[in-house]
Structures are given as structure tokens and as C-alpha cells.
Amino acid sequence: MQENNKNRKTKVAFAFCMASFFMLLFLSSAFFLTSKRHIPNTEKDQYTTALRGNIITKDNFTISTSRQVYRAEIDLRSMNPEKFELFLKLFEIYSGADKAQMQDIKKRLKSKKKNYNFILIQNLDSKHASYLKELSKKLYVQGFFKAFTNSNGKVETRGLNVVEHKEDRIYMSLDSLTPTIGYTRVVLDEQNNILKNIGVKGLEKYYDECLMPLQDEKIQGLKDIGGNIILNLDSVEKKRIDGCDLYINISLKLQKTIEKLIDRRNLDLKANEIVVGVMESKSGKILALASTRRYNPANRGEDLSVLNASAIEYSYEAGSVIKPFIFTTALRLDKLKPDEIINTHGGKYKLGRYTITDTHKSDKMSIEEVITYSSNIGMIEIAKRLSNLEIISGLKIFRFGEKSGIDLPYEQKGELPNPNRLREIEKAVLSYGYGLKTTFIQLLAAYNVFNNNGYYTPPRIGDKIYQNGRFIMLNEENAKQERILSASGAKKMQEILIAVIEKGTGKKVLTQGLTIGGKTGTARIAERQGYTSNRYNASFFGFANDKNNAYTIGVLVRNPTKPYSYYAAQSALPIFKDVVDILLSQDLLKLDINATVQ
């Protein structure tokens, strides 16, 4: 009995000791788990910055795009000294670094001024960046990196880190489509410490808000032994949303062909600049907008003036290409009769102290012949019938003195004289294109009215944008056609401009099987001291149509210096003909075989 009691006490004592031991073990474990410990951080953030959108041509060439540029860095406190030489050899292989770059790395490592966060190499492309990321994971597992205590008292292992350094904007077509496409400049995104691009000129500026990236990708969560983030319900994930892709109406094939044409022509003309625009008459779509003053957006050089788009930023006195609009105003206000004959004074007319002389001298002309033979004297007689307010209001109807609505920044409005201060001599010279300033794109859009049944259509370069998995058509939202001339008025002016080609100053453009019309213009360039005697702008604006297609085409030759090339018939007109031939060669126009046979 006594022996049994002793055994029972022994068992109870043993059970008590074991319970006390496990309780002590539990409390120690709880204290250890809840106390501040020096263990490596198990959380990780991973960011991928969104990119600026692409600009894509009508024929699906990406002419402007962005890429991520990376840098590789390492916290030297994490580096295992015994494996450092091997690390450098592996880094050289995976990064694609050349000998000079590796020598620079070793030289900087020996410097006493180096920081713990040591930049190994910058300007890595995405391919070599991905190679180094894979290398980092392998080296992490193999124990190349050691843990250290940071300034916050936490233990961490950083190792080799590959981070995005900047966004690089690339222009694959080099100088083609400039200055229309524009360019960007680099700014620091302070939130992510990354160099990003913002639009400064051209399409890059006008569509900057759309092209800008919307949201960076972010993944946050616990990491596994290989340093990879474990995706679970507790991890945080944000989707990357790049900027929109901008699709434009311009075909790169057509654009480059016209650029080569005007470059070749300018070897002979030696002009300051040649500008050519091709517009689809019904829709207002700009199919080409070319200039001989081009630049590489990635290497712009020192000539800042070449960065400006002359088609919209250069305003000038246009000369005789203004005549159709004064003429149309007189017709619209019934100041001209269809069968009327205009006194042209034998081709000479005294205007103040100047004598105006017509190239095609005649005592009298029909109203159509005044335009066909570009009679300055005939236009002066027509302008006399209009009041100052009527003549200026007539020009405003065609949007002179205001922006055309093209989707490019910094468009100039041009200048119209104040009708209350317009003297008779000023009204006279206004009738043949002096005393007002306009831009190339204003004239192109205004001439388009004659080839679009009397409707004014704002010219458009952008066609559509692609974002969030869908296309948005820009022309449907922005191109608002407005009738500014009756259909009969547009038809009448179209017939007169066709007569210019068939009988008058534009005969060189005649192409059997197409309907072609237009008007030449030659104007002295005004400077502070007055009009120059040897500097001119020559231009031709008109249209070329077949049975199914209609295009409005403009050519401006700024200050051609070849002898006698300042006449539009010798400079702008042949280029217009070349552009029509290009449209035929690229099947944008087709000859009417029946018309050719006649």
C-alpha cells in the first residue's frame, strides 16, 4: 500500500515536471517569436514602370516608341568577399559588358569615395537586364550574398539589383515625318526616381496627355528562398497601363517618297524650304505633310529654327493663291454676273505711284479669265465692288485669321487687316494676296472647300487611338464639317480652277484621265525695310481627283534662289505634278482610261 502511494507521487511529480517544462518551452517560444529579431526581411516590392505609347503610321510602321533602360547595382555590404572575383566574371558574361566597362567597374571599386550602393553599369537593354535578374536569383540561392544590418537595425540581403533607370524614346524613321511628329524631353519622375519623357513639339506634344503612361505595375508580397514574390491573397498587385497608341493618317511610304522628291528638287531650286501637304478632301485626313527642313528627334543639333513646323508656324503673304477667295466673295454677294466682262486696261494699271502690270495683257477679260490668267488688274476691279467689311468677312468665312483646327500645337492664326483702317490702295493689293498673312495649312484647308462640295473640314493627322483594349476613332469625334459655301458656288470655283490648268498658268500639271485644278501664287517676301527685290515665296494649291478619290494638294517653295525659279510655274507647279504622279504610282489615284482615249 505504501509502495503504491510512493509510485503515485513519483508519477505525479514527473507529470508536473514535464508540464512545467512544456509550459516553459511554450513561453520561451512565444517570447522569441514576438521579440525583435535580426532575421532577413521576408517582404519584397517589385515595380515595372509603364511606358509612353507608340505612334503608328497608316501603313502600320511604328515610328515612335519607348523602351525601358536599366541599371545594375549592388550593395557592397551584401557581397561575400571570397566570391567577389567570380561574381564579376559572371556579371561580365550576363550583362554583355565590354572590357572597357569592366575595367571602369574595377577602377571605381578601388576608389575610397565609393558608396555602399554601388552602380555597376547603366543603360542596359531589357534583354541583358532579364539575364542579370536570373543571375541574381541563382547567386542568391548559391550564397553569394550575405545578410547585414541596415541603418534601421533590420537585417537584410540585397545582393545584385537590376532597376529601371529611364525611359528611352526611339524614332525608327530617323528624320522622316519631322517636324510633324515632334519630339520629347526627359524629366525626372520624383515618385519613382526614373527619367520619363514628355512631349515638347508636334504630335508628341499635342497628344501628350494620351501618350503618357497611366499606371505602373506593382507587386508586393512575401518572398521565397529564391527571392521570388509569392502570389497569394495577401499580396498586392497593380496592373501596368501604358499610354495610348496613336495611329495617324499619314502613310510612311507616301511620306518618304514625297520627302525624297522635294529633297531632290531642292538640289536644283536651292530654296530655304519646300513644304508639301496632301489632304483627303472629303474626310480632311492629312495623308502626307513633308518638309525639306527635317531633323532626327533623338539628335536635334543646334539649329533650333528647324524644330518648328513651317506648315502651321510660318505665316506669310501668299500672293495670287488668295485670289479665288476674293473672287468667290464677290460671286456670293452678287457683285459679279456670270457673263460679265472685266476691264483690264490693256494689262497696265496705275495704282498710286506704282504701275501694276499683268503677265497676260488684255483690254478686257471674262470673270473666269481673271482667275485663269491670274490678272492682278482684274482682281483690283473686282475688289472695288466690295466694301472693306465684305472683303475681310469673306476671307474670315474661309477661316483666314483663325486656326484651322489641325491636331498640332503652336498653330499660328495669320493676320487680317482691320476693315476700318483699310485704305483703297491696301484693299487693291489685298485682292491679289498682299497685306494679309496666312499659313500653309490654312490655305490647304481653304482650297479643300472647293473640292468638298462647299464644306470646311478641319485637317487631321491623328486617325485613332488604342487604349484599354479598344480603338477610339479621332476623326469621328473631332472632324466637324461645316458648309461655308453653296454646292453651286463650290462647283463654279472648281470649274474655274480646272480652267487654270487647261488654259492658264497651270498647263504643266495637266494629266489626261484625272480632274485637276488649282492656282499658282508668287509673292515677294516682306522684311522690316519693305519688300525685297530678290526673295519670293512660290506656291501652288489645288486638287487632283479620279472617279472615286479626291485629294487637295499644296506646295510652298520658300525663297528659291535658282534664277527665275521664284515663279510658281517654274518651282511649285512641277512639284505638284510630281506629287500627282506619286499618288498614281501608289494607287491612290487611277486614270480614267476612257478620258485618256478622247
Image (tube, rainbow, N blue to C red):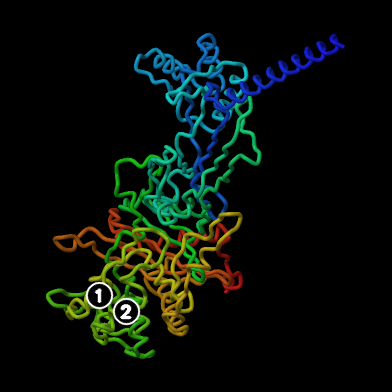
Residue lying at 29% horizontally and 69% vertically, measured from the top left: 319
Label 2 crowd (10 A; few <14 / some 14-19 / many >=20): many
* Secondary structure category for the residue under label 1: helix
Distance of mark 1 from mark 2, alpha carbons?
9 Å
Q: Which residue is most to the right?
A: 1
Give, as a three-letter code, the residue at label 1: Leu
Which picture quadrant has residue 150?
A: top left
The residue depicted at 51 percent of the width and 69 percent of the height is 283
Question: Is 577 placed above or below 47 here?
Answer: below
Which percent across, then down, holds residue 323? 32, 75
Q: Residue 133 location, x and y as percent?
A: 57, 27
On screen, 211 above or below 394?
above
Task: Assess disc 1: are there few (<14), some (14-19) or many (≥20) residues with their C-alpha within 10 Å of its C-alpha.
Answer: many
Between 535 and 47, the one nearer to me in the picture = 47
**Residue 542, percent from left and from top:** 42, 69
User: What is the secondary structure assignment of the residue under circle 2?
Assistant: helix
Question: Three-letter amino acid code at disc 2?
Answer: Ile
Circle 2 is placed at which residue position?
Answer: 326
Say which quarter of the image contains residue 105: top left
Whether residue 496 is visible: yes
Residue sticking out furthest to the left: 353
Name the residue nearer the viewer: 444 or 324: 444
Q: Are marks 1 and 2 in contact (CB under 8 Å)?
A: yes
Which residue appears farthest toward the front when viewing the image? 1
Name the quadrant of the C terminus.
bottom right
**Quick one: 125 or 220, which is closer to the camera?**
220
Count of numbered marks: 2
Location of the N terminus (image quadrant) = top right
Q: Is residue 96 visible?
A: no
Residue that badge 1 annotates: 430
- Up/down of 56 relative to 153, above or below: below
